[in-house]
Image (spheres, rainbow, N blue to C red):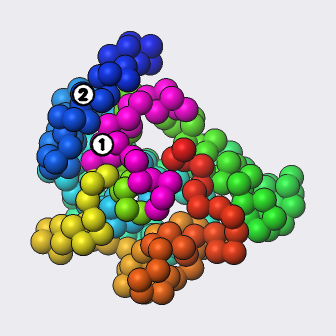
């Protein structure tokens, strides 16, 4: 299936799709994704502001939509809480909210790689707890949806609304790529979408407890991730 999808989504085809959807609504991008790929399309959800917006949009388009989240075993209690609130609000089955975890427990990781791996080798920790589980999960799909926005960081500034993800071998949709932070929060408030309570405590970007800190107003939204380290991404989006 991957070869067939890749043939349909050549560089030229991707360019045409981006030209077609640039300036259009995220819902139009999502509708196309569902028309083309359902049920082999899934939301990669960290339960951040962008992801809960996308989940609300997806659920309105197709109540049978699904998401997966990478449970690193180091998530904030507030992250699990918003997961539960979303499940209750949208009345979705457990099969639609898929927990993806590392093959190693934290204790097993510490035994094999040593304590505090996220401090000593953060890329290795992300590989074990995020990238490897993600890679296995995405093999079950033909397309995935992410909450990437261009103004989140310089590394995301050129993100397309539609991309061919050569690393994982499937189509990647970034429906909110052109949206601003203000547009994300306007949607949340308009539609009363449940969101992570940490956002109200100066956490614009939320990952693992050990690698996430609050951000001062006006600072780079992702500056609270891996503070004091030369690291801006966990390796999922490259």
Residue 19 in view, yes or no: yes
Asked if residue 163 is among those painted magenta in the image, a careful observer would answer: yes
Q: Nearer the viewer, residue 12 or 121?
A: 12
- Residue 16's mark? 2
Tell me the crowding category of disc 1: few under 14, some 14 to 19, or many 20 or more residues within 10 angstroms, Cα based: many
Q: Is residue 66 left or right of residue 6?
A: left
Whether residue 188 is visible, yes or no, is: no
Q: Which residues are magenta?
A: 153-175
Q: Nearer the viewer, mark 2 or mark 1?
A: 2
Q: Who's the residue at 14% across and 46% down the image?
A: 24
* Residue in the image at 39% along x and 46% along y: 159
Camera-side residue of 231 and 157: 157
Residue under the point 47% across and 74% down: 220
- Residue 161, label in figure: 1
- Disc 2 is placed on an element classified as helix
Q: Quick one: quadrant of the C terminus?
A: top right
x%, y% of residue 115? Answer: 84, 66
Which quarter of the rendered picture does the N terminus lie within?
A: top left
Asked which secondary structure carries label 1, the reply is loop
Please state the horizontal and vertical placement of residue 79, each as a whole percent of the image.
Answer: 45, 70
């Amino acid at each position: 299936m991957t070869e067939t999808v890749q043939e349909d989504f050549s560089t030229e085809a991707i360019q045409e799709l981006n030209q077609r959807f640039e300036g259009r609504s995220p819902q139009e991008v999502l509708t196309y994704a569902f028309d083309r790929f359902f049920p082999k399309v899934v939301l990669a959800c960290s339960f951040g502001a962008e992801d809960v917006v996308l989940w609300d949009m997806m659920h309105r388009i197709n109540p049978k939509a699904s998401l997966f989240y990478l449970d690193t075993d180091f998530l904030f209690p507030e992250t699990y809480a918003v997961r539960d609130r979303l499940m209750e609000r949208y009345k979705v089955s457990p099969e639609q909210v898929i927990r993806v975890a590392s093959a190693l427990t934290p204790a097993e990781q510490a035994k094999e790689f040593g304590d505090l791996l996220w401090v000593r080798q953060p890329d290795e920790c992300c590989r074990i707890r995020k990238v490897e589980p993600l890679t296995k999960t995405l093999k079950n799909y033909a397309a995935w949806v992410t909450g990437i926005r261009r103004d989140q960081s310089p590394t995301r500034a050129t993100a397309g609304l539609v991309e061919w993800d050569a690393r994982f071998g499937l189509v990647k949709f970034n429906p909110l790529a052109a949206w601003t932070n203000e547009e994300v929060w306007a949607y949340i408030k308009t539609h009363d979408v449940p969101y992570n309570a940490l956002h109200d405590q100066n956490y614009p970007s939320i990952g693992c407890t050990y690698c996430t800190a609050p951000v001062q107003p006006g600072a780079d939204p992702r500056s609270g991730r891996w503070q004091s380290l030369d690291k801006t991404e966990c390796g999922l989006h490259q």
